[in-house]
Image (cartoon, rainbow, N blue to C red):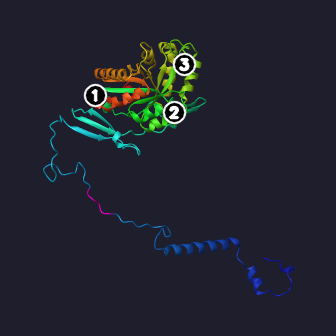
Amino acid sequence: MRRDELRQPLRQRGLAERLWARRPGLLPMAYVLATAGFAGLSAWALHQPLPFAGEPIVTVSVPPAQEITTASTAAAPGEDSAPEAYNPNTSGSEEIVEGPETPPGDDPSTAEIEFDSGSSGSRVAVISGKRSLIKAPVLDVMEMSTWGPLPRISANGDKPSSIYARSVSLNTLHSDSPKIAIVLGGMGLNRKLTQSAINDLPADITLAFAPYGSDLQAQVDRARDKGHEVFLQVPLEPIGYPASNPGPRTLVGDASEAENIDALRWHLGRFAGYAGVVNYMGGRFLSMPKALKPVFNEFKSRGVLFLEDGSLALSSTESAAKAANFQARRAKVVIDADPSPESIRQALKLLEEEAKATGMAVGTGSGLQVTIDVLRDWAKDAADRGIVLIPATGSFKGRLG
């Protein structure tokens, strides 16, 4: 019995009470409601015109395919087009390969033209503007430290020496053309001269920045934006030190390894974006293999190159680098050891002779206005003499490391 009839008054119950007493339980009611809802939704879906009704629809028209005529599909000479005029002054053939587009704001008339010989004896002209280099720093090859942003080798093996380098084709590097790399140092100390070098010199001229300038990263960024590869100058102990002093935190031959590495990392952290290091002075330090070894090990572990500026008659650079299996080399000529226009032109002529004799020559200089002016004029017609300018990192290709 659902109720205790003995507790109820003796009267006849009304209809409402009898219906309420027979009401269904909550679970059957929930089941009935769910079934009714599902049936209703199903009926609504079946009457919709599209399965994805309610979503936006865009109608577009597709134009008919058009025939595109290229060099490979154009009519052959003798059909609808006339043959090219014969040039009696051309031996073999010439091919023009367009490099990357000139960045906005660059004058197309300043495009660099590089001639190279192909395997069949034809001449190839590579035309490129002052294309911007990748913006520094690249986080994969940078390590933040108490000294600043230090270079490092990335987890997948990428090195700053390749990431920050200005590219040069293997076809150019392996050609028979005499190749010259020039590194101009002292950048960042005089803003006017630095800007002159950045704007007036071909992009294949590598610029080396001293660690003592102000606003160095911004100046380096401007140089790289104009396509110039960048090196860092590090002061090393000269003969006669400290009477002859390159500057604060000079690496000294008789200092402890820890002292020199601490000073070196201070210099390495001045800015980001350099592919290699070049010495500033260092006549004594570079003649001491024991002092060089930990410095070269530091360079190698961080993936940067080392170039000796060619100002020293004797040094241990190449032997110490070979022993460490490290990428280092020496320049042959300091083009402005005598900073007069005629002497600089003569030094550049010697550099050309070296390049023609050996295939590759490296020279260095300082960011003097006279050097910039003579170098700018010399570079304008270097290609006419068969000279190919390459960035400093190009001179290291094929070496150990």
Q: How far apart are marks 3 and 1 (CA)?
A: 39 Å
- Say which amino acid is labelled 1: Ser
Residue pushed farthest left? 78
Q: What residue type is labelled 2?
A: Ala
Apparent side of residue 76 relative to residue 53 in the rendered image (left or right): left
Q: Where is residue 267 in the image (x, y as percent from the top left)?
A: 54, 26
Numbered circle sitting on residue 272: 2
Badge 2 or badge 3: first in the primary sequence: 3
- Which picture quadrant has residue 120? top left
Label 2 near label 1: C-beta < 8 Å? Answer: no
Residue wearing tag 1: 177
- Horizontal side of 148 relative to 88 (left or right) equals right
Range covered by the magenta-colored residues: 63-67
Closer to us: 48 or 11:
48
Disc 2 from disc 3: Cα separation: 20 Å
Dividing the picture into quadrants, the one containing residue 333 is: top left
Q: Which structural element holds mark 2?
A: loop
Q: Which of 57 and 17 is in front in this view?
A: 57
**Residue at horizontal 51 percent and vertical 13 percent from the top:** 290
How many marks are shown on the rendered structure?
3
In the image, taking residue 19 as reference, residue 6 lies left or right, namely right
| 68 to 201, vertically: above or below | below
- Seen from the viewer's position, the closer of residues 250 and 70 is 250
Percent position of residue 232, x then y: 49, 27
- For disc 3, the marked residue is 251
Crowd band around label 1 with a 10 angstrom C-alpha radius: few (<14), some (14–19), many (20+): some
| Res 100 quadrant in image | top left
Q: Residue, x 42% and y 12% (percent of image)? A: 314
SS category of the residue bearing label 1: loop
Who comes first in sequence, dot 3 or dot 1? 1
Magenta span: helix, strand or loop, mainly?
A: loop
Q: Of the residues shown, which amino acid type is indicated by label 3?
A: Leu
